[in-house]
Image (cartoon, rainbow, N blue to C red):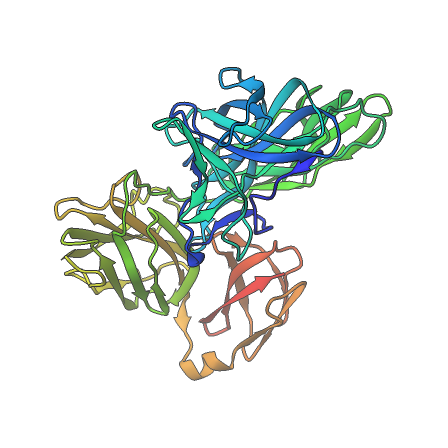
Amino acid sequence: MLHDNGSVFNVAGPPQLSVLQTSLGLDTYGAGAAQSSGFTVADDFVLTAASDIGHFEFYTYQTGATAVTINGVYLRIYNGSPASGGTIVWGDLTTNRLSSATLTGGYRVLDTNLGDTTRQLQLVKANTPGLNLAAGTYWVEVQFAGTLASGPWAPPITITGQTTTGNALQFDPTTSTFNPLLDATFAQGLPFRVYGPLNACAGMPNGGTAVVTPLQGMPGSSYTVSATGYSENPGLSYQWQSNTNNAGWVNVGSATSTYASYNATAPANMGDTVQWRLQITCTATSDVAYSTVANFTVALVYCTPTATTNDATGLTNVTFNTINNTTSSTAAYSNYSTMTTVVNAGSTYNLSVLVNTAGNFTVNTKAWIDWNGNDPTFTNATAYNLGTITNSANGAPSLSPVAITVPAGQAPGSYRMRIRAVFGSSTVPVPCGNQNWSEAEDYTIVVGGMAVNDSQTQTVQIYPNPTSDVLNVKGFDLKNVQVFDLSGKKIDVKIDGNVINTSKLQTGGYVIQMTDANGNVVSRRFSKK
């Protein structure tokens, strides 16, 4: 590597995140740099010695992309700032320099909505054949093309707690001028890297990091397996390998002399897991390296509501049993499914919401609960009408609160609740699809069984929490245990008396439902390290 201009990610993850820090006054996800619009972005780099340039790496995204969508990258190199008389020494904006584009598995998100997955960053490599530069300061101008309508957009260098991250420029085709790349009033930098030419492999290569996108999917759904940080020298062989339900590693497809991502299909059964890794072999030495392992799980994945046009219209508070969530998100969808509340079959609870109509407008609000636990589009979910409200920044719709009765005999487990507020008195909210000027939020309802009395509940303890290998239960005589992850999937565990073996659980949050000999049920949340 000859130059690293800065990182787009400021949260290591997984997943890696590039967090737009609205708390600091920043408000721009990314800069326009689409070939279709004529906008470009540019930034400077320094070479300490004369160098042959092999390729550049950039980051970009198209909103809503779940697979690689970038199909073009265009470069120009200047001997000085293009805003101050620098001249082009190499390149043009008509020759496609794309070598590869891969999903990073990382996302550009708001600090108020870290779970947003609508802006996945793509790593774009641009070849620069015949480019040799003397020592000095240069500027690279870049422009992208993609298959979606949104963007492509160029995210800035992102540093936690810092507003100014560089001195990049943006070309405005309407005025034919280069201007400082700003977020609000703060100067931004462009994250990119410059590499020299690659030599033939002569030893152990670097396997890099495997990435699966998305991490979960329905049976038969499509997902993408890619890698970052792998060696790309001549003389290497690339082979994808998978391991389904720990049956053993097998080659997938054929080995290739150049890297390529892989489009995979999910197995048929809920709960199936597939591990992926990239095997890289140096053919001259027979040295073999492996990437890190990435996991895909077949699970219930709910639809993601969208809004092509949006403003402050949306929910400002949701209260249901022990959930009390006040928000100010302007996103079309916020996934708060890690917020859970435990309810009992046959009992009734009030759902209350507050809404911002974003002016003298009417907003319609509705909720759905997937009591079947298997309905990703809420087609057969139970709907609850919360009514309308007009001209309020934080008011209750006409039918809020609404009484929700948990069906008698409802099986213990985790169930998804979705609430959506939509502009328009005659616009009926729907749980999936695009509705402009709308916001949807998801939560998780955990159904127990016969509840023990409050005094007994207070004496039940689980420890240690977070846990590593075992979870101990005190104050409750266990007969049966069920463990659910936060997507609602039941996880098998072994119990020995009042000790639960958690060694095989993956890192994350869980709900445990404990039953005694009398049928009493107590639920608790815990985390696995």
Toward the right, the furthest residue is 285
> Splitting the image into 4 quarters, where does residue 403 fall?
bottom left
Q: Residue at x 40, y 73 (%)?
A: 451
Residue 97 in sight = no
Nearer to me, 285 or 414 = 285
Judging depth in this view, the residue of 374 and 116 nearest the camera is 116
Q: Is residue 389 left or right of residue 248?
A: left
Of the 4 image quadrants, the one containing the N terminus is: top right
Q: Nearer the viewer, residue 125 or 519?
A: 125
Q: Residue at x 19, y 47 (%)?
A: 423
Residue farthest along the bottom direction in this orientation: 455
Query: Does any portion of residue 486 appear in the rendered image?
Result: yes
Check the image and report above or below for 39 versus 463: above
* Looking at the image, residue 244 lies above or below residue 24: above
Residue at the extreme front: 85
What is the x, y in percent for residue 47? 70, 33
Q: Is residue 368 above or below residue 354?
A: above
Instruction: Judge from the rendering whether residue 396 lies leftward or rightward of residue 26; answer left or right.
Output: left
Residue 421: horizontal and vertical position, in percent?
Answer: 24, 51
